[in-house]
Image (tube, rainbow, N blue to C red):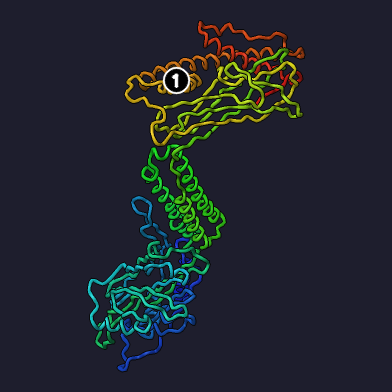
């Protein structure tokens, strides 16, 4: 009874081992494997002697798997174990249970040292049997790998490296026996031990099979490292996404190659090495876990290379700017505009590719059509960037680049006629190429309220009064230089006498008044045939033009320094005339701006306080500014402080009073 029980346990053990093997998370082959044991075929040599463990089964003629091709591939995973060594099956089965181990396929992508280009992409895994210690058998082990048609087109090559081979080569008898055994199954490949190659299987898809074997002799073990190399872009084919039909088939077989049955053979030499063939099939569940493979293909092969393509073209264009758009033929403003345009087109193209890739990754629906989308986006982006250009500076050019809004602020209805300054400085920018003289004029059209009431206002500039729509001389330019290529920025503070003021009569109705201001340039171009008005050459002290330019630059810098609370610095960086003009312009604008800012802050605070406490009494009659802080012993400072205080008090009081019942707004 005990003997029978042990026999049952020994028969169940291989099944238990296989069950544990194929559900273990450390093994990734599909769950179902067709396990087949081939019975002893009853062969007895003519002399009647059957030596244990020395017969070589020709298992390539087996037909137990109905859909098996001549190359031994099938749509079903299988283990086929063969007896050898005589009629007693336990010679084989009691000493060996087929266990085919493997590692999970790993996708690898290797970049070059600059991390810009893909050097190689591959899947790698290990498959085979553990070491089986048994007697001599002249054994070999063989591996065959093929891919489903959708993956085969993306494979460059497959490397199969068996992990063990005999230190001695097989003799001619063993070699010949192997050739006869496998010759009919390997198509156009020339069978040979310790070699590898490829052939086309005779299945309906005529798939390419990669093959490698190793002569083990009297050794043990039998596994191989397998690497599937994917095509790179320069090989003309990029790897594609896997679909539900993607598969990699791995076939492994081992057999004895004992040359002949010899009645005199030592009975202790038993070929207990396993004789088997097995097939395993990798599916997307193993090859593309959590879409990792598809993600890598999308990022490494598609998104990143096309983004790099766009960036490379952008960098090339940027590098060529000095040669393509030399100064002074092209201005820095033009070049900056060109850079902004190609930068925007670069960023737009990259964002389209990146967003489309992220959307696909989020959905999990990987579609090969995205490759064409990326390519088209990259090509269109590059075409747009390449198409950007600049026109050389014309021989003569003058244009208004920018003008300010004219805002006279919120004002109280006056009980007498009043003059009001603008509430903020004005900046006008003129582009000038070879126009030595020009005049900028300003006219202000009719202002009307939202209710349609006209504002009966006039304007003052340089102590001259102008009516609505009458042209006012805002700025005159005169430069005797031959070659003019400049942007002239005209800055005026609200209290400057050459800036516009509004004259508002006491009869003004409350309202929010708006209208249109018109800026007009009148000009004369430089005579291209010769000198158009002299130059400053030979005058070591400079010319009046130098003084004028220095004065203008000093004004602009003085205002900027005052607004930024910078220390006073009236040092110019030109010739004597330029520096004199710079100092005069800086001194006037710096002091005036500082005093105006201080006056505005003081006036606004006082007005806010007075307005908040006024209640419903309205605006106090005869209100005035307190200029006690504005003398400072300097006329310009006092003038600027008073102007700032007046504007600040008016706006502060209006905000504090928080009522519009007795106020009106007139401005542009």
Residue picked out by circle 1: 551
Image position, residue 436 (x, y; %): 45, 30
Q: Is residue 530 above or below residue 455?
A: below
Image position, residue 72 (x, y; %): 42, 79
Indicate left or right for 643 with 289 as reference: right
Residue 2 visible in the current orientation: no
Residue 621 visible in the current orientation: yes
In the image, 443 versus 103, the foreground residue is 443
In the image, 476 versus 111, the foreground residue is 476
- Residue at 54 percent across and 32 percent down: it is 402
- Residue at 28 percent across and 71 percent down: it is 165
Q: Residues within 10 Å of mark 1 (few under 14, many from 20)?
A: many
Image position, residue 155 (x, y; %): 40, 67
Indicate left or right for 428 with 329 as reference: right
In the image, 628 versus 111, the foreground residue is 628
- The C terminus, quarter of image: top right
Figure label count: 1
Image position, residue 253 (x, y; %): 37, 76
Q: Is residue 356 above or below residue 520?
A: below
Q: Quadrant of residue 187?
A: bottom left
Task: Kindly state the secondary structure of the residue where label 1 is placed.
Answer: helix
Q: Is residue 140 above or below residue 347?
A: below
Q: Is residue 462 above or below residue 3?
A: above
Q: Quadrant of residue 575?
A: top left
Q: Most extreme residue toward the front, as rendered?
A: 529
């Amino acid at each position: 009874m005990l003997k029978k029980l042990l026999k049952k346990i020994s028969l169940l053990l291989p099944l238990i081992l296989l069950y544990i093997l194929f559900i273990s998370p450390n093994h990734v082959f599909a769950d179902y494997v067709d396990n087949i044991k081939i019975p002893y075929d009853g062969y007895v040599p003519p002399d009647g002697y059957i030596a244990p463990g020395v017969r070589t089964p020709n298992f390539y003629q087996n037909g137990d798997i109905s859909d098996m091709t001549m190359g031994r591939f099938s749509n079903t995973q299988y283990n086929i174990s063969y007896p050898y060594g005589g009629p007693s099956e336990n010679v084989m089965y009691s000493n060996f249970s087929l266990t085919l181990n493997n590692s999970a396929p790993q996708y690898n992508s290797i970049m070059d040292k600059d991390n810009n280009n893909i050097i190689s992409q591959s899947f790698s895994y290990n498959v085979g049997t553990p070491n089986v210690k048994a007697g001599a058998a002249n054994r070999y082990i063989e591996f065959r790998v093929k891919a489903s048609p959708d993956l085969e087109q993306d494979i460059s090559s497959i490397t199969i490296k068996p992990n063990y081979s005999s230190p001695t080569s097989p003799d001619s008898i063993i070699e010949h026996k192997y050739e006869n055994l496998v010759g009919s199954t390997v198509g156009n490949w020339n069978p040979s031990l310790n070699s590898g190659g490829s052939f086309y299987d005779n299945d309906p898809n005529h798939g390419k099979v990669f093959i490698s074997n190793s002569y083990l002799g009297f050794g043990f073990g039998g596994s191989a490292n397998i690497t599937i190399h994917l095509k790179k872009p320069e090989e003309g084919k990029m790897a594609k996404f896997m679909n539900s039909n993607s598969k990699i088939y791995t076939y492994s077989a081992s057999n004895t190659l004992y040359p002949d049955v010899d009645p005199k053979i030592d009975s202790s030499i038993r070929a207990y090495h396993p004789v088997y063939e097995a097939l395993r099939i990798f599916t997307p569940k193993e090859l593309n876990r959590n879409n990792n493979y598809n993600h890598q293909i999308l990022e490494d092969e598609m998104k990143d290379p096309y983004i790099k393509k766009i960036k490379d073209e952008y960098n090339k264009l940027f590098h060529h700017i000095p040669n393509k758009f030399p100064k002074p033929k092209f201005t820095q403003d033009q070049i900056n505009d060109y850079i902004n345009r190609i930068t925007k087109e670069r960023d737009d193209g990259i964002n389209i590719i990146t967003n489309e890739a992220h959307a696909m990754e989020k959905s999990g629906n990987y579609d090969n059509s995205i490759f064409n989308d990326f390519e088209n986006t990259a090509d269109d982006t590059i075409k747009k960037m390449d198409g950007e250009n600049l026109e050389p500076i014309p021989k003569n050019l003058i244009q208004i680049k920018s003008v300010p809004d004219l805002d006279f602020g919120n004002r109280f209805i006056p009980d007498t006629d009043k003059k009001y300054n603008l509430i903020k400085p004005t900046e006008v920018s003129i582009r000038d190429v070879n126009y030595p003289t020009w005049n900028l004029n300003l006219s202000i059209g009719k202002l009307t309220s939202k209710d349609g009431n006209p504002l009966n206002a006039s304007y003052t500039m340089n102590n001259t009064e102008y009516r609505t729509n009458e042209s006012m001389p805002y700025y005159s330019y005169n430069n005797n230089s031959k070659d003019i290529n400049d942007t002239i920025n005209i800055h005026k503070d609200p209290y400057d006498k050459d800036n516009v003021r509004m004259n508002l009569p006491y009869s003004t109705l409350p309202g929010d008044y708006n209208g249109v201001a018109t800026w007009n340039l009148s000009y004369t171009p430089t005579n291209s045939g010769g000198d158009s008005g002299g130059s400053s050459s030979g005058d070591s002290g400079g010319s009046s033009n130098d003084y004028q330019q220095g004065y203008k630059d000093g004004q602009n810098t003085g205002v900027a320094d005052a607004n930024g609370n910078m220390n006073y610095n009236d040092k110019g960086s030109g010739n004597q005339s330029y520096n004199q003009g710079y100092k005069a312009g800086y001194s006037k604008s710096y002091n005036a701006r500082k005093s105006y800012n201080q006056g505005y802050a003081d006036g606004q605070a006082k007005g806010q306080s007075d307005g908040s406490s006024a209640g419903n009494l309205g605006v106090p009659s005869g209100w005035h500014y307190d200029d006690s802080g504005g003398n400072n012993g300097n006329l310009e400072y006092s003038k600027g402080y008073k102007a700032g205080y007046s504007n600040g008090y008016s706006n502060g009081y209006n905000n504090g009073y928080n009522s519009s019942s007795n106020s009106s707004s007139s401005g542009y």
